[in-house]
């Protein structure tokens, strides 16, 4: 079972997320997102982005993101971008997409749990943590994000325990 092991709020942005996108339906029998991530690494997209956007890197650029937007509750569809967060002035390289992230306040949780099931619970656990801390989510910025940090996620993936720590971001008031 996944649990929140850390909660904080922070000022975030303005930034731009740049990467590759797919339109995801939550009702698909198999989740295409893990294969999408594998493709990004296999085809060296992150290395290319880091090289092309070297002048636009910001502290959060060291982490990879799964950026979610355009969620449609009736159909369960959303746009899912695998990429990097960079300075808001960064150009979008040909063949990639870019979405602007406005300056906003976000809640950042560290979700700890089984590597195979943590992703399904991360958003709901973050929303619960926001409420438990007397705040509320702010859907006006239009996104949520999984953040795969070098500080927490990568080391936990390399351990043999099967337990990972995923950062999850939801704009809040």
Image (cartoon, grey):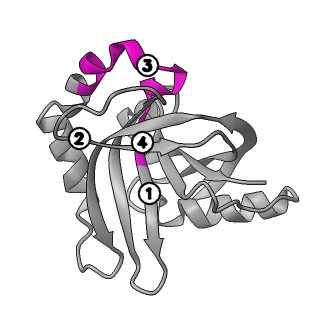
Give the CA distance from mark 4 to mark 3. Answer: 14 Å
Residue at left offset 36%, top offset 33%: 158
Residue highlighted by disc 1: 68
Sequence-wise, the earlier of marks 3 and 1 is: 3
- Span of residues in magenta: 49-66
Rendering quarter of residue 84: top left
Rendering quarter of residue 52: top left
Label at residue 96: 2
Sequence-wise, the earlier of marks 2 and 1 is: 1
Kindly report which numbered mark, 2 or 4, lies closer to the viewer in this rendering. Answer: 2
Residue at left offset 29%, top offset 33%: 92
Quadrant for the C terminus in the image: bottom right
Q: Describe residue 57's horizontal placement relative to residue 5 as left or right.
A: left
In the image, residue 24 lies at what x, y percent?
30, 68
Sequence-wise, the earlier of marks 2 and 3 is: 3
Label at residue 57: 3
Q: Is residue 160 magenta?
A: no
Q: Nearer the viewer, residue 153 or 39?
A: 39
Give the CA distance from mark 1 to mark 4. Answer: 9 Å
Q: Is residue 52 magenta?
A: yes
Kindly report which numbered mark, 2 or 1, lies closer to the viewer in this rendering. Answer: 2
Sequence-wise, the earlier of marks 2 and 4 is: 4
In this view, the residue farthest toward the top is 55
In this view, the residue farthest toward the bottom is 74
Residue highlighted by disc 4: 65
The answer, for residue 162, to whether it is visible in the render is no
Kindly report which numbered mark, 4 or 3, lies closer to the viewer in this rendering. Answer: 3
- Identify the secondary structure beneath mark 4: strand
Crowd band around label 1 with a 10 angstrom C-alpha radius: few (<14), some (14–19), many (20+): some
Give the CA distance from mark 2 to mark 4. Answer: 14 Å
- Identify the secondary structure beneath mark 3: loop
């Amino acid at each position: 079972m996944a649990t929140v092991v850390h909660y904080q709020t922070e000022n975030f942005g303005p930034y731009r997320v740049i990467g590759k996108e797919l339109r995801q339906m939550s009702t698909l029998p198999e989740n295409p997102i893990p294969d999408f991530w594998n493709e990004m690494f296999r085809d060296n997209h992150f290395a290319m982005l880091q090289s092309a956007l070297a002048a636009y890197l910001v502290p959060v650029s060291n982490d990879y993101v799964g950026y979610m937007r355009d969620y449609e509750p009736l159909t369960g569809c959303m746009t899912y971008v695998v990429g990097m967060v960079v300075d808001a002035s960064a150009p979008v390289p040909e063949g990639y997409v870019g979405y602007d992230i406005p300056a906003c306040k976000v809640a950042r949780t560290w979700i700890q749990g089984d590597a195979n099931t943590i992703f399904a619970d991360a958003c709901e656990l973050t929303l619960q943590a926001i409420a438990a801390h007397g705040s509320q989510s702010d859907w006006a910025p239009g996104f949520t994000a999984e953040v795969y940090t070098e500080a927490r996620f990568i080391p936990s993936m390399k351990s043999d325990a099967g337990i990972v720590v995923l950062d999850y971001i939801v704009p809040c008031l």
